[in-house]
Structure formats: structure tokens, C-alpha cells
Image (spheres, rainbow, N blue to C red):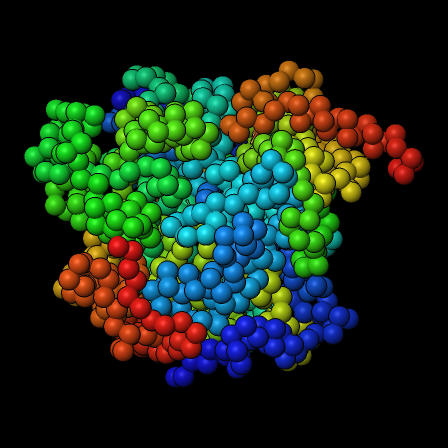
Amino acid sequence: MKLTLKIWRQKNASDKGGFATYPVDGISTDMSFLEMLDVLNEELTEKGEDPVHFDHDCREGICGMCSLYINGNPHGPLQTTTCQLHMRSFSDGETITIEPWRAKAFPVVKDLVVNRSAFDRIIQAGGYVSVNTGGVPDANEIPIPKTIADEAFDAATCIGCGACVAACKNASAMLFTSAKISQLALLPQGKVERKTRAEKMIAQMDSEGFGACTNTGACAAECPKGISLTNIARMNREYFSAVVSSDNM
Amino acid sequence: MILDSKIPAGPLEEKWTKHKFNSKLVNPANKRKYDVIVVGTGLAGASAAASLAELGYNVKAFCFQDSPRRAHSIAAQGGINAAKNYQNDGDSIFRLFYDTIKGGDYRSREANVYRLAQVSVNIIDQCVAQGVPFAREYGGLLANRSFGGAQVSRTFYARGQTGQQLLLGAYSALSRQVANGKVKLFPRTEMMDLVMVDGHARGIVTRNLITGAVETHAAHAVLLCTGGYGNVFFLSTNAMGSNVTAAWRAHKKGALFANPCFTQIHPTCIPVSGDHQSKLTLMSESLRNDGRVWVPKTVETAEKLRKKQIKPADIKEDDRDYFLERKYPSFGNLVPRDVASRNAKYVCDEGRGVNETGEAVFLDFRDAIARDSEDTIRARYGNLFDMYQQITGENPYKTPMMIYPAVHYTMGGLWVDYNLMTNIPGLYALGEANFSDHGANRLGASALMQGLADGYFVVPYTIGDYLAQTPPKKVDESHPAFAEAVDKVKGGINQLLNIKGSKTVDHFHKRLGKIMWNECGMARTAEGLKEAKKAIKALKKEFWSDVKVLGENEELNQSLEKANRVADFIELGELMIDDALNRNESCGGHFREEYQTPEGEALRDDENYAYVAAWKFMGEDQEEELVKEPLEFENVKLTQRSYK
Ligand SMILES: Cc1cc2nc3c(=O)[nH]c(=O)nc-3n(C[C@H](O)[C@H](O)[C@H](O)COP(=O)(O)OP(=O)(O)OC[C@H]3O[C@@H](n4cnc5c(N)ncnc54)[C@H](O)[C@@H]3O)c2cc1C
Ligand code: SF4
Ligand code: FES
């Protein structure tokens, strides 16, 4: 395959940045999207031009490190991560536009690399059960209905990639935040702190500069892990019951 | 040099309890006076950092990814072992201990492995308390499965994403301590060197991957939880960034490197499809519970298949060779990883491989689908089948999967004593970065167990004993050792940037990988290893005179990051070869063709090689010195592993 790549280049956080166009040739349909960029980078390096910087690590769709806004979609045309996207999803001669995630809370570091530390800070605000190592009950002491455990698992599969934020016109982080709040609210171990958790995590989310949710569902439509919108509804319930309940007044 | 493994005296079952009692304690009020550096935030690092912070120590945690949650542990699929015996099927601490020692082909320490089996039960309790959503039965209790050929069901799992869920649990505990102000996080920061003061580990030198700033951090102890070195082979199932740099630089400062040649090659990976390939994808081992492994009986049929003149379905039952079932009637397709991998290599070497490259065997679900229905198979392995289809473009419900072995895990690593301390006082190694528990072959679902055992339940006790004997005075960063280490790191970076050669870093990495895979992979010979050693020496020279690293230090520079790592991989590769050459026996993942039983199985030499081979760095371009730690077996009898 022969392709034309229009890629966002930006030297560092303070650089203005802009698009550059690169032709690539000899791309096999079996390559992953990132392997296609590897080919480009090898060529650029050989020519003495700075390779395109992008984030990636596992290349198995689980670490959440890869990003890329491809032809107007986070992680490209399929509902998967960029590292799991293969070139057979594109056609010969196509022009592909590649940009970084665009969100105020995810500033560009260089080229296609952004800073997603805001997500870590949301978790630090309360995305945990407050237990220390040791001194916990036997794992089978509290039975959990399988359906509940499965639902908690589904929410827990969020990989923290940020595609939901990139997909949202308001750059809202509701889907990400609600996934963690849901997981812990569903499980008996997480119920103890559910009120303060919802309040603190939402407050942190707001302070990071993520936008409001207007229920368009763009986030869930692009989420590579299929995190469901019902998590947002559950988070709103958690938050509401937290602010009205007596022990918080 | 004599290595003291500090294994406590007394009966096996009592060693750990007694040892904990005999260890010195740091007074609670004094804990806040001690600083601990934890490099790595995978299962081992995140669990250690969180637990130490909970105890009151001041922790600094480092990782090269943008978030601690992305450590390579996140990718583990299958599960985690624990001797809970919830299934009432005869499991026990002793059985897990015994299976691990035997599975490791009798090249690990009894005392460490027994402790691992003991604390395994606490790990599951801890994870459940954190909200890890393990798989459950309809009655609400935890589900288990049998894994990797174990004869009991002791593996806990969270669908095909166990590593993810365990790591997110440890990450949440870590995040809580960040919020408490007890852990300071340093993401996108790479450790470049270890700093030693008066023979003790007292700090590290790091490079900020965004700004390039080379900085120092001082502490009373340093924990390396930096994972395995499988990427020395270029292609492996490890994450792209997994590297040996932290461990290697510590090695060059005096920490011994143990059993470097013990690598695990996993039998069920998606085969290489071309030169562009950047990494290999593991298909969970659980697939071997229902898939049957086969190749055509004859080379002629295989050739037709490779030329796409026939399809797998055209090959009649009589013309198929289910080679694992044929050779190992009692274990069949479930033989341990090393045995399954080696046999796949044999049939492909004979010319019976089934894909275009000739390096693949079938994993066929036809019979399982006929027996249990497609829906049942989908319920069991749906996500894996989807992943396979996404990567290869083929539908495994209709046509057999193709698999081939790939490098997956490294049993070797920094030498540690019973306390997980290296031979450098104050320097610890945890998780895959150490060599401690898996001998010459690791059992499935035991790496996650070990990482969390080390971090949650071992190091929090053993580090106290060391710190209690260390004055709580702040470590002085103005000590000349810090400035010296910084100069050395900066010098190395400048050297790489100034070569301005003609070949990319990946070019060298790929060549290194080919040498290692061909001569130090699934089967090794003295002759091949000697050639490989020459080839690596030449490659090293070429690298340092012709590598092309663009850009500068003072920016995000991914080529420079890779160059630093590949430079270390080249040196490690040479040591792996020395180690493989030295070990004139076959054991576990280390298979020397000269040493095999008449049936072609690994032939150990317990008389001469029942030892840990720990290597000491003697200076640039010098041969390393071998230090032996003899292994003593008091509780298990050494036997020939047989899965017939
Ligand atoms: C695909 C796959 C599936 C697996 N499945 C299973 C399974 O089902 N069951 C099982 O038991 N095991 C499994 N394993 C093995 C297991 O996942 C690993 O052995 C284990 O997770 C390693 O954990 P760790 O904490 O030691 O290191 P890692 O998780 O590799 O973490 C290393 C950490 O060190 C940091 N680091 C490294 N170098 C530096 C440096 N120089 N400076 C700063 N930071 C650095 C990294 O950023 C990272 O945070 C699997 C492995 C793979 C590849
Ligand atoms: S909710 Fe989905 S899109 Fe958002 S961070 Fe999690 S996995 Fe990514
Ligand atoms: S690189 Fe890990 S999810 Fe894409």
C-alpha cells in the first residue's frame, strides 16, 4: 500500500505546531498502525529528520498508553486501541490525518504525545478502598453475586487511555471517572467509602479542567473497552445521594 | 567471593515465621526518617511502594511510562496461583511449593519457594479487599481454574485480564499513598545509574524523559522492581519499553546477575508475519485446554499448505500428526511450556511448519467445537479468538489457529538473598527483575504471585532489618559519588548523540535479537554459542561507531531512550551466552542439544550444576567472573521431569 500521512508535528509544549505531510510506500495490510509509523520513523531517521513521537508500550490493547486521533476518530475507525488497529482497515492511496488527543486537561508534550496525569490525580482523589496491606479478611468471607462481580469487572476494564475525553466535544472525563466509581460502588468492599469517593473524585475531575457532560454518548461510542454509559448514570446517583445524605451535611 | 543466601535455619515450614521474628524492627516514630526509592510500578513495585508508605517510610516511585498504571504487568492474561485449596482438590502450600520446585527443574531455592507458597494465600485476600473483581461462581465465592498443566485448580483470574486487575488494585493502593503524601511519583523518568556511598546503595541517577534533565535522588535503600529482559531478543511478548537498563547498571556497580540464560519461551503466540513485526502477541495458555496441536505428517503436505495449494481442512485425519498427544500421552497438549515450545520447534525444523515462513503449528478447535458447540467455545475464549482475528485477519472458529513459540519471561535476574537484597547492601530486587523463585522454568500464573508476594509481604519485613541497622540521618546528596554518577551518565548520553553514524537503533536491536534467538533461544549448542559471542562482540563495536541517534538530550527523544536500552541489551546478550555456555546440562528453558535423554528430553547434571550461576562484572570488555551458590535440597527428591 501507498499512503499519504498528514501528521501533527509540535516540538514541545510551547511550540505552536502544525501539520506535515509524509508519503509512505510498501505498507503491508498485516502491519499494525503503529508498525506503519515505525516504518515512517526508520525512513525519517535514515534521512536525518526527527522521527514522529507517539506514546505506546504494550501494543496489545491493554496498557492504555497509545492514543492518536486518526481521521477524526480517537484510535481510528474501529472501536479498538490504535495499537490493535491494522492497516487492512485502510485502502491503498488513502490520505490519513493523525493528530494528538485534543483536550485542555491533556496538554501536548511533543508531536502526538500528550500529558494524561490528570487521570492519575482523579484516581488519587479517591479511586481506592482504604485498606492497608495485611489484616484483611479471608477472600471468601464475603460472597459477591456473580452478576455484580461481572458488572464491576466490566467497569474495571477501563484502560485509562483518554479516548473518551478526546471524543467528547466538551472534553469531559465522565466515562473514565464513572467507571472507577461504579466498580467500587458495586462491590461490598467499596461501599463503605462510596459517598466521599464520588464527591472527591468528581471535584478533582472538575478542577482538572475537563468539560461538562451533555449526554451525547460520543465517549462510549469510541471507548475501546466498551465502557458503558450506565456507569455515568450510576455515578450521578452516587454523587446525588452523597450530597443529600445526612452524614455529609 | 562467597555468596551468603541468608536462608534461616530450622524446618522449612518455620523458616519464614522465625525469620520475621528474628528480624530487627524500625521504631514506628523513626520510620518517617527513612527514605526508600522504588524503581518500577508493576506488580512488584506498586505493591512494595504502597506497603512501605503505609508503614510510614517516605517513598519515591519511578517509572518510564506516563502513568504507573501502565507497567508491563498490566498485560498478564491468565491468572495468579495461590494455595487456597478452595476447590478441596488436594492443593496445599506444600504442593504448590513442590510443583514450583519441580517445574523449575530443581534450580531454585527451597526456602524462597516455600515462603512464596505460604504468602500466596494472603495475596488473594489482599486483592479482594482492594476491590479486585476476580471471577466468581454463582454462589458468590471465588472461581478457580487449572492452568499450565497443574493437576489442581489453584489459579484465580479476572477473565483474560488478570494482570490488569491486579495491577490496578496495587495502583489504587499506591495512589492512596500519593494522596497521603507518603509516595512521590516520578512518571516518565528513567533510572540511569545506581549511586553507592561506602559500599551501600544510597541513591539513583535519573533522566527526565520530557526535559532530558539528569538528576539525583538519595535514599537509605533502593528497590529495583524493573521487570524482565525478554526484549534482548527484540521480538518478545513484553511491552516495547521493557528493558534491562536499571538492573544492568546496578550490575555494573557490583550487583551479581544470576542465571541470565534462563529464559522462558511461551508456546502459544501468534507467529511472526514479516520483517515489520515490532512485537509478538501471546495467546493465553488456557487455549491448550481445548485446542489440539498438530502439523501435517509429511513435509510434502506441509509444503502444499505453505504454497496455499491446500487448506488445513483438506488434510485428512490420518495425515495429521498431533505430536504432543503422540509423544506425551498422559499430559498431551498440556505439557509444560518448555516442552511444548521445543517440540513445535522440532517439527518446524523438520520442514513441517504450516505458514508461509514455515514457523508455525496449528492449534485446532474443530473437535472441541464439535464436542461442546461453538457457543461454549466462544464463552470460554471469545476475547482471545477476537484478538486473534483482529491481528491475523483469520477466523479461528472456521480454520485452525496458527501459533509459534515466543520469548515471554526471564527467570534470570539480579541475584538476591532470602531478604531479596542483592549483594550490594541496601539494594533490593523484586519481581521479574530478580532471579529468585522460578529456577530454570516458571509455571504459568506464578509470576504475578511472586511479584505481589515480594512487594506486599516479603520486602516490608526484610527491609526493616536493614534499615534498623542504618542511622536515620538524611543521605547527603553532596557526596561526590552523586556528582560522579551524574557525570558518567551525561558522558554516556553525549557519546551516543555524537556517534552520528548511519544505522538506526532498531537496526542494531533487530540484529541482536536474531543472534540471540538463533543461538541462545529454544535450543543451544556450544558451537553456536561461541559463534554468537563473536557476533555480539562485533555488533557492539559497530553499534558504538555507527549508530545514528538524532536530536538532543534536552527534549523528549525516543531514539535516545532506545539507544540507551539497546546498548545495555547488547552487553547482557553476551553475558547470557557466557552463562549458557558454562551450563553444560539441559534444564527447564535452557536446552543444550548436547545434553538430552535418548527421548530428547532435557538432561540435567545435578552433580555438577545444581547451583545458581551468579556473574560478577569485572570491568568494561572484561570476561565476567562466575560465583556459584550451591543449591541444597532437603525436602524434595531430585527426579527427572517426565510428562509422558
Ligand atoms: C503477555 C504476557 C502475559 C503474562 N501472563 C501472565 C499470567 O497470566 N500469569 C503470571 O503469573 N504471569 C504472567 N506474565 C508474566 C508477568 O506479567 C510478569 O512477569 C510480571 O508482571 C512482572 O512484574 P514486575 O512488577 O516484576 O515488572 P513490570 O510489570 O514489568 O514493571 C516494570 C516497571 O519498571 C519500570 N522500569 C523499568 N525500567 C526502568 C528504568 N530504567 N527506570 C525507571 N523505571 C523503569 C517500568 O516503568 C515498570 O513500571 C505474563 C507476561 C506477558 C508478557
Ligand atoms: S472509559 Fe474507555 S475511552 Fe475512556 S479512558 Fe477508559 S478505556 Fe479509555
Ligand atoms: S500500546 Fe498499550 S494499549 Fe496500545
Which residue, as the protein is rendered here, is positioned at the far left? B300
Left or right? Give the position of B414 relative to B604.
Answer: right
Which one is nearer the viewer's eye here, B284 or B201? B284
Q: Residue, x 17% and y 44% (percent of image)?
A: B348
Q: Residue, x 53% and y 29% (percent of image)?
A: A225
Vertically, is A146 above or below B323?
A: above
Quadrant of res B373? top left
Left or right? Give the position of A238 relative to B207.
Answer: right
Q: On the rendered image, what quadrant is the C terminus of chain A found in?
A: top right
Q: Residue, x 17% and y 25% (percent of image)?
A: B314
Q: Position of residue B520 (x, y in %)?
A: 24, 58
Q: Position of residue B584 (x, y in %)?
A: 22, 70
Vertically, is B312 above or below B362?
A: above
Q: Residue, x 57% and y 75% (percent of image)?
A: B14
Observer able to see residue A226: yes
Observer able to see residue B492: no
Q: On the rendered image, what quadrant is the N terminus of chain A found in?
A: top left
Vertically, is B281 above or below B386?
A: below
